[in-house]
Amino acid sequence: MGIQFGNIVEDSIAFFLVITIGILHGANDLLVLSKHSSTKRTLLSKNFLIYLILMLLCIIFFFLDAFLAIIMFLIISSFHFGEEHFSEILKQNMIIEYLYFLNYGLVIFGMLFYNSPIELKSIMVDLVGFSFNTLWIDTSLLVTTLLFVILSLYYVFRKVITIKVVLKETLFLVFLFLVFKTTSLIFGFAIYFILWHSIPSIIHQVLFLSGSFTKKTMTRFVKKAILYWLISAVGIILLYVLTPNIELFSSSLFAVLFAVTAPHMWVMSKMKISE
């Protein structure tokens, strides 16, 4: 697809995937929070309040300093990607485990930015007026890749993961690098976000909520999420239609994504701990 289609088609497909499956994977956060709070309304109300406060703080933070908000978004998203990806393998809740989660996500973003510097610059200029330095991106990718290898070998040495798992993850990263190299930045990110993150996350959430992944439990999950998904999808579409220029739309959309990513990561981390 990256070879056959241009950026307009790729980005349209990416937008469709994100607005459907991508939004769906985070639409049941409140249901996940209520899993162990059904008989404790005070606890559920407290968690819901924390969720809203995190959203509000992210929005305020973005308008105070957009560049730092972008850095924070990358750190939060990177950790969340790694945590979800390795949640079935690493469950020790140690500092080095958190570093591994964060580093994995940074490798993903590093490869993405390395292969799409022009598109990245365009988006960054729209948001904050300048972009990441090329040398900084190259150096970050090199450092995080080396750290990924070192930490992976550490886990192999400790017999936490097998060399087979490391080789598999390495091949996936090489494949993703080639995907990012032959596609637009947005489409490349959508491929990772949907296939490597959102779909596995949905399966993980269904298993957590229902104990099994079947057509029935998946249908129940979608029914529970449909209202929140519809509100989110319509909201983003209206934002696009009503925003007078693409620069303002980019800023507004990023503010929304940043605001929902932090509380969603918090919910998923609580889910991982309570399993």
Image (cartoon, rainbow, N blue to C red):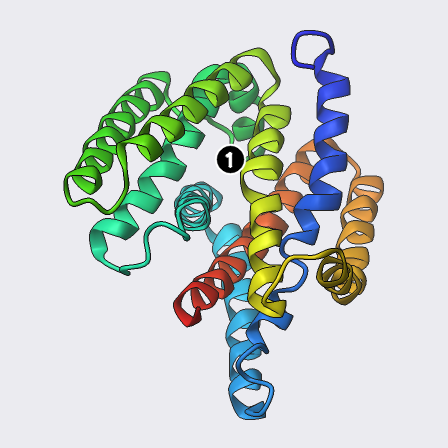
- Disc 1 residue type? Val
Query: Within the image, what quadrant is residue 75 found in?
Result: top left
Q: Is residue 244 above or below residue 175?
A: below
In x, y percent, where is residue 95? Answer: 22, 55
Task: Give the camera-side residue of 174 and 203.
Answer: 203
Q: Residues within 10 Å of mark 1 (few under 14, many from 20)?
A: some
Which residue is at a point 51% across and 35% down the rendered structure image? 128
Q: Residue furthest top?
A: 3
Task: Give the camera-side residue of 210 and 126.
Answer: 210
In x, y percent, where is residue 71? Answer: 40, 42
Q: Is residue 69 above or below residue 13?
A: below
Which residue is at a point 36% across and 49% down the rendered structure image? 89
Element type where label 1 sits in the image = helix
Quadrant of the image containing the N terminus: top right
Number of numbered tags placed on the structure image: 1
Quadrant of the image containing the C terminus: bottom left
Q: Is residue 155 left or right of residue 202?
A: left
What residue did someone put label 1 on? 128
Query: Within the image, what quadrant is residue 2 found in?
Result: top right
Q: Is residue 243 above or below residue 29?
A: above
Q: Is residue 41 above or below residue 160?
A: below
Task: Give the camera-side residue of 117 and 162.
Answer: 162
In x, y percent, where is residue 250? Answer: 65, 37
In x, y percent, where is residue 90? Answer: 32, 52
Q: Is residue 233 left or right of residue 87?
A: right
Which residue is at a point 54% across and 53% down the rendered structure image? 261
Task: Give the camera-side residue of 109 and 97.
Answer: 97
Which residue is at a point 52% across and 62% down the rendered structure image? 263
Q: Is residue 162 left or right of residue 249?
A: left
